[in-house]
Amino acid sequence: MVVELKDAAKFTGIFIISCCAVFVCTLFLNFNMDMAGIRDEIAPGPVTVFYEAQVSSGKMISYVSGGCLLLTSVIMLFFYIKHYIDSHRKELGILKALGYSDFKIARGFWVFGFSVLVGTGVGFGGAFLLMPRFYRVMNEENILPDIAVQFHFSLLVCLVLIPAASFSALAVLYGCRKLGSPVLTLLSGKQGGIFKIRRQKKSGRKNLSFLQDLRQSTARSRISLVFFIGFASFCYSSMMQMTFGMDELASPMFTAIIFVIGIVLSFTTLLLSVTTVVDSNTKTIAMMRVFGYSQKDCRKAILDGYRPVAYTGFAIGTAYQYGLVKGMVSIIFKDVPEVPDYTFNWQALFITLLSFAVVYECMMLCYSVRIKNISLKEIMLERV
Amino acid sequence: MIRACDLFKSYGSADNPFPVLRGISLDIEDGEFAVILGASGSGKSTLLNVLSGLETPDQGDVYYEEKKITGLSESELTRFRREQVGFIFQQYYLLPHMNVDKNVKMGADLSGNKDYREVIEAVGLGDKLEKLPGELSGGEQQRVSVARALAKKPRVLFLDEPTGALDEATGRLVLDYICRLQKMYHFTVVMVTHNQNIAQMAHKVILMNSGKIRDLYRNDTQKTAYEIGW
């Protein structure tokens, strides 16, 4: 087998994202399905309005967060498969040269779906552990009749088994497609996949220094990493501000869930992305150090190009959370009495931005130390 | 002048050290072409690393003129490399997403060399400024790495098996460029190779075996890259 089960362990990002997605979706969808059982017991009037609001908000949260996280998981899956193929080009080339078909090699990629299975399984199980408390909080004022937690097999199928199977199939198909390179291209180890080498535009870039040029080209040559770093900041910004801004609209438990998911999701994505940036630039960094560029120069050239992306992601996250909560309040809770008006929370923005800046810059500082520790000998000892 | 005094270097653990350099002492004069010759595992690349400040010896010192570089801090060594030395490796190590011009600029920017394109012209790649490394042959890539190293105007050029990945014709071409550029810019060359024929191009030959200098001699006349055997 080309890909072994231990390789699936590298998919920590997908594991965490799928875990978060299924956790949130299971909580709200299971609650909705259980609420459907008490629909007939509810008399028309304010209770029905509350009921409908609960159902709508549950659906919206599940679809928005689930859809967003699903999309991210798929992009991350593609990213990792491309990364795997690029870092194993020679071995895969040898297999192809020996006569293995693309499908025969790619079918081993099914194990990448295993990380989704584990992630969704943990998310699903975790949601059931928290569910009794979640139900109590969601119906804290006993507006609705008692809702008992029930297990819905269809949810297990839809949220755990189908995603895992789909991701496995997707991994095999995508792997098959990416392995289409000619044998000699794979054997030569030339990059043609994940980090496509883009020709620089001639116009307007003549006067850039080498470091400015490298900063731009490093960021531009890794579009998927740009996405992930932007996404991490987006998650942090939107979820933290929601946590601070929704204290009057949602229960402490709900905001705590958003807070924890926001932290885990953004940090994992950011850590994995920046680690990949540094790892994939090890040779460039080593070469720069050999030539006499300082640690600061290396950090600026390799990492600073992503800073605008991170802060742009933060800005989009701010707008997104405001639009989402405002939309929820004005559409879903429009008939619910005594729902406070939702206004932009500048204090939440300030606190979130400050904490983001501190965390982001500290992380870059840590990676700067890692850059410093890249051994110059790595490049000197390498031979054909 | 580069002066190495009684260099010792071992790899492996403290319990089980593997000695690579065992008491190396030598002098290399300014503007000299020195070749370090030896079989695989003789310690020649480690000696090059120590002489260039990429590695620190366990014992012994390296001097550039009167300045001792062993014992310098990491940032001082970085400044030393930036101001004094250039490197050329067997595997070129060009930046794949940057064209010839930008790759050479990597070296040029360190010394504020605005006329770095002269060097690109000198290695015969003036018409390939916009080409990416992947679009060049092995010989052309090595010439880019020569231009990159020289664009920073080094006082000493260190070369680690610069022709190791090249065929004979291309290898001769690259060596010829290096020799011609040395005459033009008067830098010192320290080259590691296992090709004994290349030693005939050098002023000084340092023959290494098992971490020691087995022989050290000067050539009365230097042959050109096209006069030596291969």
Image (tube, helix red, strand yellow):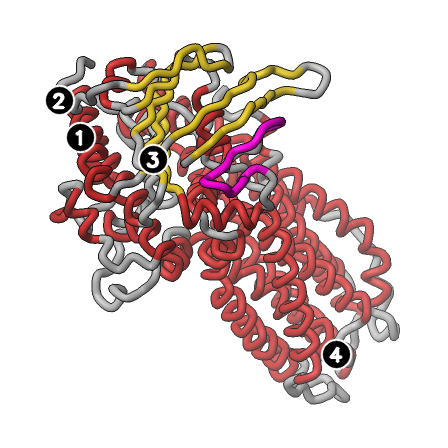
Mark 1 is surrounded, within 10 Å at the Cα level, by few (under 14), some (14 to 19) or many (20 or more) other residues, namely some
Residue A37 position within the rendered picture, expressed as x and y whole percent measured from the top left? 75, 60
Is label 1 in contact with label 2 (beta carbons under 8 Å)? yes
- The residue tagged 3 is B88
In what element is the residue under mark 4? loop
The residues colored magenta run B57-70
Q: CA distance from mark 1 to mark 2?
A: 8 Å
Q: CA distance from mark 3 to mark 4?
A: 64 Å
Residue B114 falls in image quadrant: bottom left
Mark found first going from the N terminus, 1 or 2? 1
Residue B212 position within the rendered picture, expressed as x and y whole percent measured from the top left? 49, 14
Residue type of the residue flagged with mark 4: Leu
Residue A57 falls in image quadrant: bottom right
Residue A147 position within the rendered picture, expressed as x and y whole percent measured from the top left? 83, 61
- The residue tagged 1 is B176
- The residue tagged 2 is B226
Q: Which chain contains the residue that carries disc 4?
A: A
Asked whether, in this view, residue B187 is left or right of residue A328, the answer is left
Is label 1 in contact with label 4 (beta carbons under 8 Å)? no
Q: CA distance from mark 2 to mark 4?
A: 83 Å
Q: CA distance from mark 2 to mark 3?
A: 21 Å
Is label 3 in contact with label 1 (beta carbons under 8 Å)? no
State the residue in front, A156 or B128. B128
Mark found first going from the N terminus, 3 or 1? 3
- The residue tagged 4 is A249
